[in-house]
Amino acid sequence: MKWNDVVSLNEAFVPACDIKAKDSNYWKRFIPHKDFYNLLDKTLDMYKNRQKAIWLQGTYGSGKTHATMVIKEIFSRDLDEIKDYVEHSIKDPKLKPAILNTKKELKTFPVILKGSYHIVDSKTFAFAIQQEVMEALLQAGIKHSLKTSFETVLNNIENHPTFWNDLIKTSELQFEIDSDIEILKNKLKQYDSHILKLCEDELRKRDIHIGVKNIVKFLEEASSVVKEYGYSHITLFWDEFTSVLETPNYNDIFMSLQNIAENIKNGNVFLFIVSTGQLILIK
């Protein structure tokens, strides 16, 4: 007798959970446990008391991402979409009614981030957030008039094509876009934060400063947009955040993160950070 005659692998098994996966039903396979109930309770408390942030820390493979995916689905879907899961899978007698009651008034707009995004400082940190907010709005079919740092630079290119053609020929940009200004514009239209960073660097070398979007103001404007579509606020779910804090300027990045948590008014934007290693608390 062979082992595969006795034991077989579930066809639905996924060796590593990807928070950006498109499988809309994978989250329902999660089996709640004591630690998850604790996380769920703290998340409810975050939204209820507007504490602004959750920082989930654990070792690799401990189920952080899958748990975060379930939290994201519960609080971003309509009540009728999650009611069956809550009724049958959530066994905690206090949490079940708390979720259902909270969901009558709360529906967060999720923005999913993962990894480092070529982040090296607070500015590229802001670029990455703008990139994923715009992508999330696009995926949700939400029309908006938000202006990002990408549009600011793009408008400058369209208004000063001769200057930018000369800049491209004498900069690192030429290798990234094959010296083609149209490729540069298309990459900015696709919210390529790496390209935007290169544009900013080249302008800075020439002592040219184009106003970029303040990230707190941008997130406030984004939260106003999603409210028109039935969402009560925005939550930034950032998985594998540890890689961001491994950059040389991690203090600058962390201060920017703290600034978002402290200055977004009226609980319009919340943070859900997932990392490995040492736990850092955002108050």
Image: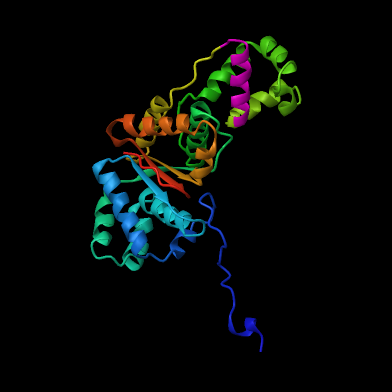
203 within the magenta span? yes
Which of the pair 25/278 is nearer the observer? 278
Please indicate whether residue 46 sits to the left or right of residue 172 in the image.
left
Q: Please report the residue visible at 31 percent of the width from the left and 65 percent of the height from the top.
A: 87
Highlighted magenta segment, given as a residue range: 194-208
In which quadrant will I find the N terminus?
Answer: bottom right
Q: Is residue 22 above or below residue 151?
A: below
Count of numbered tags: 0
Image quadrant where residue 150 sits: top right
Q: Where, by quadrant of the figure, is residue 111 drawn?
A: top left
Q: Position of residue 149 (x, y in %)?
A: 52, 23
Q: Nearer the viewer, residue 270 or 22?
A: 270
Q: Nearer the viewer, residue 247 or 269?
A: 247
- Tell me how the rendering is colored: rainbow
* Magenta highlight: main SS: helix
Instruction: Specify whether residue 149 is painted magenta.
Output: no
Tell me: residue 90, above or below residue 24. Answer: below
Quarter of the C terminus within the rendering: top left
Where residue 85 sits in the image (x, y, percent)? 37, 63
The residue under the point 38% across, 33% down is 258
Image quadrant assignment for residue 54:
top left
Q: Is residue 139 left or right of residue 258?
A: right
Tell me what residue is drawn at x 47 percent, y 54 percent: 65
Determine the residue located farthest toward the bottom in the rendered image: 1
Q: Where is residue 206 drawn, in percent x and y?
A: 62, 11
Residue 218 placement, left or right of 45: right
Q: Position of residue 26 (x, y in %)?
A: 49, 60
Q: Is residue 260 visible?
A: yes
Front residue of this view, candidates 214 and 100: 214
